[in-house]
């Protein structure tokens, strides 16, 4: 049976967080910074705290002085760019 690749672009933040925790996908050892938007200096930190450390968006927002919605937006933007650029990859073993 062939290994059917995951459509990582269809994953939301929670799905990707869960996939990382179950070792289905890999996360870059050094989270990249993307673009020139404001708060780009913290976007990778937010991504690591959310995806790797398992922090809630509420706690992250409080720590960085953001609204929860803005925190989610920054994390989502980082996720989409990381997936599109190949930083997040399916690492399930072949069956």
Image (cartoon, grey):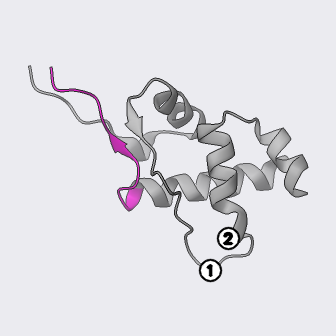
Query: Which range of residues does the magenta coloring cover?
Result: 84-95
Q: Are marks 1 and 2 in contact (CB under 8 Å)?
A: yes
Residue 89 within the segment the image draws in magenta: yes
The residue lying at 76 percent from left, 35 percent from top is 56
Q: Residue furthest front?
A: 29
Secondary structure at badge 2 equals helix
Residue 57 at x, y percent in the picture: 77, 41
- Dominant secondary structure of the residues highlighted in magenta in the image: loop
Judging by the rendered image, the residue that carries numbered circle 1 is 36
- Which residue: 32% across, 38% down? 90
Residue assigned mark 2: 40
Category of crowding for the residue at label 2, using alpha-carbon neighbours closer than 10 angstroms: few (below 14), some (14–19), many (at least 20): some
Location of the C terminus by quadrant is top left
User: For residue 44, what is the image quadrant?
Assistant: bottom right
Q: Is residue 65 left or right of residue 45?
A: right
**SS at mark 1 in the image:** loop
Is 73 situated above or below 56?
below
Image position, residue 23 (x, y; %): 41, 28
């Amino acid at each position: 049976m062939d290994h059917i690749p995951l459509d990582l672009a269809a994953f939301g933040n929670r799905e990707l967080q869960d996939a990382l925790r179950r070792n289905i996908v890999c996360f870059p050892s050094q989270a990249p910074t993307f673009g020139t938007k404001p708060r780009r200096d913290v976007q990778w930190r937010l991504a690591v705290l959310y995806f790797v450390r398992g922090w809630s968006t509420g706690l992250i927002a409080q720590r960085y002085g953001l609204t929860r919605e803005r925190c989610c937006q920054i994390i989502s933007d980082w996720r989409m760019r990381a997936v599109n650029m190949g930083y997040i990859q399916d690492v399930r073993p072949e069956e």
